[in-house]
Amino acid sequence: MHGWQVSSAQALDIQRRLAAQVSRSSEVVTPRFIAGVDISAGNAQGVATGAVVVLQYPELRAVEAKVVSGELNFPYIPGLLSFRETPLILAACQKLTITPDLILVDGQGIAHPRRMGLASHLGLFLNSPTIGCAKSVLCGTHEMPAIEPGSYAEVVDRDETIGVALRTKLGVKPVYVSIGHKIDLQTAIHWVLKCCRGYRLPEPTRLAHLAAGGNLVPKAGYQEKLFG
C-alpha cells in the first residue's frame, strides 16, 4: 500500500488517503481464532519487540504466538505511531501459521485525529477485521461510563462518535474501543467484552502485551507452537 521510509509530511498525506479506505461495516460473524497484537517500547538503542498471540474462541486458549524484535525506523511523533510500530507487528503476523478471523490491537483505530490509528492501518495492510482497544484516549472527549462492567460512554471528536470508553472490570479505568477495519462500533464493543476474562484488558491484547515483554509463559500442549 505504501513504503515505510517516509517523512512526517508524507505520513500525514498517507493517513488522510488511507482513512477513506477504512470499512466501518462488520464482516465478523463468529470468529474461530482471535488475535491480539502489541509492541514493547524501544530501549535506548531504539530496538522494540512486536508480538501477536492467536487465541481459539470461545475457549480463549492461546494456540500460537510470534515475536519479532527490530529497530524502530520512524521517530516518535504522536498521531503517527503506526508508522513507527506497524512494520514490526506486520513482521510478527507474517510468521503465523494460523490466520485469525479478528484482531484486537493495543492502540487506536479511527479514534485518531485523522481517523487512521494503528488498528486501522494494520487492518488495511492485512485486509482483516481489526478493533482498536487502547489504554488511553488520543483525541475526543467523553463522559465517565458507569461503574458496572459493560457500561460505556461515547468518545466524540468534532461532532463525530469515534469510539467508546468501555468499562471492562469493576473498579478499574475504562479501555478505549474504536473501529479498526471491517467492523462497526457495536460489534467491536461486543467482541471486546466477549474476550474479557476478569482483567481490564481483553485476553488477546493482554497476552500480546506479555509476549512482547517476554513474559508469556507457555502452557503444556502448545509450547512448541507458541515459540516455534
Image: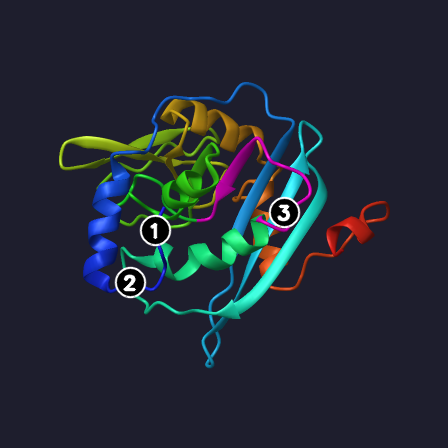
Residue 98, compared with residue 207, is above or below; it is above
Report the Cα–Cα distance between label 2 and label 3: 29 Å
Report the Cα–Cα distance between label 2 and label 1: 9 Å
Q: Which residue is mark 1?
A: 2
Residue furthest toward the left? 158
x, y (%) of residue 194? 56, 28
Quarter of the figure with residue 123: top left
Q: Which residue is mark 3?
A: 53
Quarter of the figure with residue 158: top left
Residue 120, compared with residue 80, is above or below; it is above
x, y (%) of residue 22? 32, 33
Q: Residues within 10 Å of mark 3 (few under 14, many from 20)?
A: many
Residue 218 vs residue 183: left or right? right
* Residue 103: in magenta span: yes
Q: Which residue is mark 2?
A: 6
**Which quadrant of the figure contains the C terminus?**
bottom right
Q: Is residue 139 visible in the rendered structure shown here?
A: no
Which residues are the magenta region? 94-106
Front position among marks 2 and 3? 2
Front position among marks 1 and 3? 1
